[in-house]
Amino acid sequence: MFQSSPSTIRERSLTVLDNSVFVVADPQQPPIISGDEAKHQMLSKNAKQRKLYAEAKVKAAQQRHDRKNKQQPKGSTTRVRTSAVPLSQQLSGSNDSAEQRSKENNAIHNSHETGYEEDELRREGEQSRKQETITELVKQMKRGQQQDMKAPEKLKGNKEDESQSKLRNSSKRQHKNKYERQGDQNMQQVDMKQNKQNEAMKQSTHENRGQKQQQQGERPGKREAIDEKPQGDNVIPKDSQIVVQKIPTIKERIITFVHVGKAGGMSLRDKLSLICRLPLDHGQTPNEIRRCIDKKHPNKRDLLGRQTQYYFHMWSYRQSYFRKSTSFLFVLRSPVDRVLSAYRYAHPANCYDDRSVYKESPLPHGCSLGDRLKKRPKGPTGVFFKFCFPYAAAEEFAQSVMSPWKADPTHPNTTVPSSLATKSRREQMDCRKKARGAADGTFKTDSFHLEFNYRYYASSTAYAFPGKEVLAIRTENQWEDIQHLANNYLGGNTTFNNTKAVSHGSEKYHPSPITQEAYRKLCFVLEGEIEIYLDLLNRAQNLSEGAKKETDWNLREKCGVKLGWIEWKRHCKIKLQGDEKRLGIVPVATSNSKPNYSGVA
C-alpha cells in the first residue's frame, strides 16, 4: 500500500494479489471493490462496445448497398447478390442481433466465471498433491531410519547363516576327500597290479628272446636299445609333453625345413630341391622357384618335396612364413657332435692352400675366416683361433671348456692342452672362458654355426608356435628316417636311396675321435642344448617310440649318464658352479628368445 503525492494527478492502479482481490492504490477513493463486481463491470463494458461495433457495421453495409443501386444504369440485366431476407427486415433485425450478442456476452461472462473457478480448483488440487508428496517423503524417511536400525540384526543373522553354511561345506568336503582317498588307494592298487603284469610280460618276452637267440646261435642277453627302456627319468620338461600338436591333412600341410647348421642338412636340402628356396629374401616369386626346381630336377617331385615350401637357415628366414606353415621339419644331431663339427669347419687351419680340393663342394668357413684374420689378427676371433687354439685339434678345444679334473679311474686323461700349457694362469683362464662361451654360443667367434644353435632355431619355430606339428630326421639315421617320413607318415611312394652325401667336406678335417673325458666335459657345458635337443626329439610326430629311446640311450652312454637325466643335471650343475667360481665366470641367464641378428622379420 502506498499514497500518491497531492501535486500529481490522481490515478488508480489495480494490483492483483494471491487472493484474487483488486486493491485501489489511492486511499481517498471509495472503498475496495470485490473481484466479481470488477469482472462484471469489465464484461458489460465489452458488450456495449461490441453492440456499437455491430451497429456501425450494419450502417456501413446499408451505405454500400445504396451506392451500388445508384451506380447501376437503367435497363441493365446484371444480377445483384442479395440475401433472401428483405433489407427492411435486415435493418430491423439488427436490434435483434444486438440482443443476441448481449446474450452471448453474458454466456461468455458466465464461462469466464466458471474458468476462474476451475483455475482455483486446479490450484487447490496442486497444493493438495504437494502436501501428499511431502507426507510420503516423510514416511519414507521414517521407514529408512527403521531399516537402518534393523540392519545390524540382519547382518548378525547373515553371519550366522554363513558360518553354518561353511561348516556344512567343510563337512561335505571332508566326506568327499575321504572317498577320493579311498578311490586313490584303489587306483594305486590297480596300478600296482598293472605294473606287476607288465613286469611279468617283460620277463616272458626276455626269456623268449634269449631262447630264440640260443637257437639262432647268437650270444644270449644281447641288448636291443629299441625295446628296452633306459634307466632313470627323462630330461625333457613336463610342459613339452603336454603340448597338443595339430596334425594337418595332406592338402593342408605346409612344411618349413629348419636347417640346423652342421647336422647333415645339406644332403636333405639338395634331395628336396630346396636350393632354389635359399634366395627367398630377394623377392623371388613362387613361379620362378617352381621353374628353378623343374629345371634342376625335371622328374616329378615327390610328396615331401612338394609339401616343403619354406626354408630356414641362420638369418635367412621370415616370420610370416612360420605363421603360414603347419609343420617344422628339423634335422637333429647330437649337440656335442654338432659343436665339434662346427669348430672344425670354422677353424682357419682347416683351409688347405690347394683350393682345388673344394671343386665339388663350397669353401669351408675357415678359408674366409682366415682371410679376415690376416687383416684383424688382434680381434676377439683372432685371439680365439690364433692365440688360444692355434691348432685345429678338437681335443684341445673340448678339454678347455672346463678346468682340469682330478685324476680318478673314470677320467684318467687329466692333462692340460698343449696350446694352454705354455701360457700364464691368467691367459689360461681367459682362453677357457672363451672356449666355454664358444661352445654354448654366448661368445662371438665369427663361427655362425656355433652361435646359431638349437636354442636359436627352436625359439623361432617350435617354441614360438607350440601348437604346430614337429617332424624330425636324425643325422645318424638320415635316409631311414626320410624314407619313413615320406612314405609311411606322409603317404608318399618315393624311394629314397642312400645317395651321395653333400657337405662342405668338414668331415675330412682331423676326424679322429676325442677322448671320453673331453666329450663328457662338452656334455656338461651343453646341458641346455641337450635338453632342447631331447625335447624336439620327443615332440617329433614321425618318429616311433623305439627310435626315440634308441637315440636317447646312445647319448646317455656317450655323456656318462647312469642314474637318469635329472640326477645327471644336478651333478652337472655342481660341477659347472665349481668351475665358474675357479674361472670367475658370471653365469648368463638363458632364454628362448632368439639373438638380435639382421634377419628379415
Image (cartoon, rainbow, N blue to C red):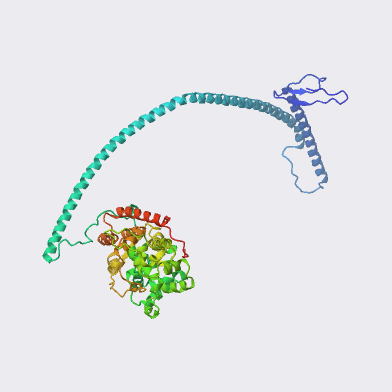
The residue nearer to you, when weighing 7 against 182, is 182
Q: Quadrant of residue 309?
A: bottom left
Q: Seen in the image, is 444 located left or right of residue 480? A: right
Q: Position of residue 78 (x, y in %)?
A: 76, 48
Outermost residue toward the top? 31
The residue nearer to you, when weighing 389 against 94, is 389
For image coordinates 70% across by 24% down, the residue present is 18
Q: Position of residue 517 (x, y in %)?
A: 31, 62
Q: Position of residue 283 (x, y in %)?
A: 47, 70
Is residue 243 among the parts visible in the rendering?
A: no
Q: Quadrant of residue 269?
A: bottom left
Outermost residue toward the left? 215
Q: Position of residue 195 (x, y in %)?
A: 20, 50
The relative height of residue 578 versus residue 64 in the rendered view (above or below) is: below
The relative height of residue 357 versus residue 269 in the rendered view (above or below) is: below
Q: How many marks?
A: 0
Q: Quadrant of residue 19?
A: top right
Q: Dividing the image into 4 quarters, which one contains the N terminus?
A: top right
Q: Seen in the image, is 529 located left or right of residue 24? A: left
The relative height of residue 4 versus residue 215 in the rendered view (above or below) is: above
The residue nearer to you, when weighing 187 against 165, is 187
Is residue 366 among the parts visible in the rendering?
A: yes
